[in-house]
Amino acid sequence: MAEIDLSRPILDRNEELAAGNRALFAEAGVFVLDLMASPGAGKTSTILATIAALRDRYRIAVIEGDIASRVDAEKISAHGIPAVQINTGGACHLESDMIRRAVDALPLDELDLVIIENVGNLVCPTEFDLGEHAKVMILSVPEGHDKPYKYPGIFQIAEAVVLNKVDTMPVFDFDEAEFRTVVGKLNARAPIFPISATKGDGVDAWAEWLAGRVDAVKRA
């Protein structure tokens, strides 16, 4: 029986466009972060906390990916940060051509850091290179410490893991030690940053890690 794999041409085309994005970001000297998480993990609140920590040091913009609505982009814009909304119309992830069109709406040469909020999903975003410098994933405490068993791929490709909503730890059966052990086995190089984006706990350590990556690109 003949079998045709249609995913490879799609991914090949995406990677070709991602290379173009990467060259564009390098030319502008801007660091680009792809932030991935499930719906409700706190992506937008983490972005807002990161902006609050770093806006005096860097010029920041945000690309918001969502299936529908402008809710998150409007939250970002309300804080005086340039934001571009991408509505995928049903697609569960962002792709390189979407990022290129969004970037065209930003003053890239006037920026140091672009944060991409990917569509809420723990599976699809792992397959698509956007031309970013780093992929970081957020897991929130209410989702449970067993997610690395169920969705290992996103933990394996992440350069860092943000564990959000740690202020809710006392009311959920979340085993942080087991979580750290499993993530360490999947991806020993990824640091884990426990934070509460809404209360500010742990945000400084996460922001300093990100600042180090931004500075490295600016020095290159």
Image (tube, rainbow, N blue to C red):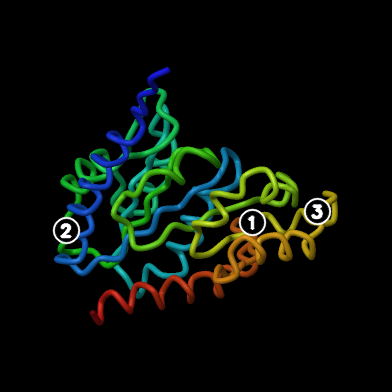
Please name the residue shown 33% across and 54% down the image: 80
| Mark 3 residue type | Phe
Report the quarter where the N terminus lies: top left
Instruction: Give how far apart the Cα atoms at labels 2 and 3 are.
Output: 41 Å
Q: Secondary structure at mark 3?
A: loop
Mark 1 / mark 2, whichever is N-terminal: 2
Relative height, residue 107 to residue 15 (above, below): below
Q: Which mark is residue 164?
A: 1
Whether pointer 2 and pointer 3 mark residues with C-beta atoms closer than 8 Å, the reply is no
Decide which of 140, 21 is in the foreground and name it: 21
Whether pointer 3 and pointer 1 mark residues with C-beta atoms closer than 8 Å, the reply is no
Mark 2 / mark 3, whichever is N-terminal: 2
Please name the residue shown 20% across and 41% down the image: 101
| Mark 1 residue type | Asn
Relative height, residue 124 to residue 25 (above, below): above
Q: Quadrant of residue 197?
A: bottom right
Relative height, residue 91 to residue 163 (above, below): above
Q: Quadrant of residue 5?
A: top left
Q: Secondary structure at mark 2?
A: helix
Within 10 Å of the Cα at label 2, are there few (<14), some (14-19), or many (20+) other Cα atoms?
Answer: some
Q: Secondary structure at mark 1?
A: strand
Furthest residue to the bottom? 219
Instruction: Give how far apart the Cα atoms at labels 3 and 1 are.
Output: 12 Å
Give the image location of residue 21, x and y in percent. 21, 53
Q: Which mark is residue 24?
A: 2
Q: Which mark is residue 174?
A: 3
